[in-house]
Image: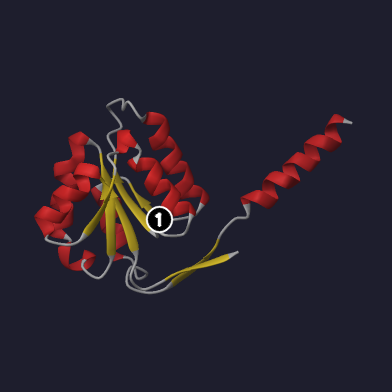
Amino acid sequence: MKITMKENKRIALIAHDNLKAELVDWCVNNREALTPHALCGTGTTARLIAEATELPVKAYKSGPLGGDQQIGAQIAEGEIDMMIFFWDPLEMQPHDPDIKALLRIAVVYDIPVATNSATADFLMASKYINAGYTHELTDFQALAEKRAAVMKTEMK
């Protein structure tokens, strides 16, 4: 199935506590590039970015309270085109399974994900950031059905 992202992207902005200031600074430094896009984020991160940049940022719940799952659901529904998620690889998070699920769903739905400022810079500098982009989405349902059929055959 082909998916087309429009010129103006829908970007999720998320950061763990130790990296919120870094993401806010990154957003301030990239305010002009972010302006044409629809922004959303989890709890405090969304509020801090909105205050610092004066850009509208739709806030979901805090990550540990279900915000990661809300954003994952939006990705699955095709409502988010890319995600910038500054996550802290050195600190255990109480909602770690939710974080892993969010990252997994981003891969399943083939959206660009930046997990640090360098990657976020590369995404924002991409020729696709302000242009349409069509890509092929893997049909995981058909793949799962094929695997199940193979397993069923092997069990006979």
Locate the N terminus and report the quarter of the image it occupies: bottom right
Which residue corresponds to the image point at 50% horizontal and 53% vertical from the top-left? 109
Q: In which quarter of the image is residue 136?
A: bottom right
Number of on-image labels:
1
Q: Residue 90, percent across and down?
A: 28, 28
Q: How crowded is mark 1: few (under 14 residues within 10 Å), some or many (20 or more)?
A: some
Badge 1 amino acid: Pro
Q: Quadrant of residue 61?
A: top left
Determine the residue located farthest toward the right in the rendered image.
Answer: 156
Task: Give the residue pinned by disc 1.
Answer: 112
Q: Residue 96, percent across and down?
A: 37, 30
Colour theme: secondary structure
Residue 63 to residue 29: above or below = above
Relative horizontal placement of residue 125, taking residue 104 as reference (left or right) = left
Residue 17 to residue 60: above or below = above
Helix, strand or loop at disc 1?
loop
Q: Residue 71, percent across and down?
A: 38, 48
Residue 110 to residue 43: above or below = below
Relative horizontal placement of residue 22, taking residue 65 as reference (left or right) = left
Locate the C terminus and report the quarter of the image it occupies: top right
Residue 87 to residue 81: above or below = above
Which residue corresponds to the image point at 20% horizontal and 45% vertical from the top-left? 45
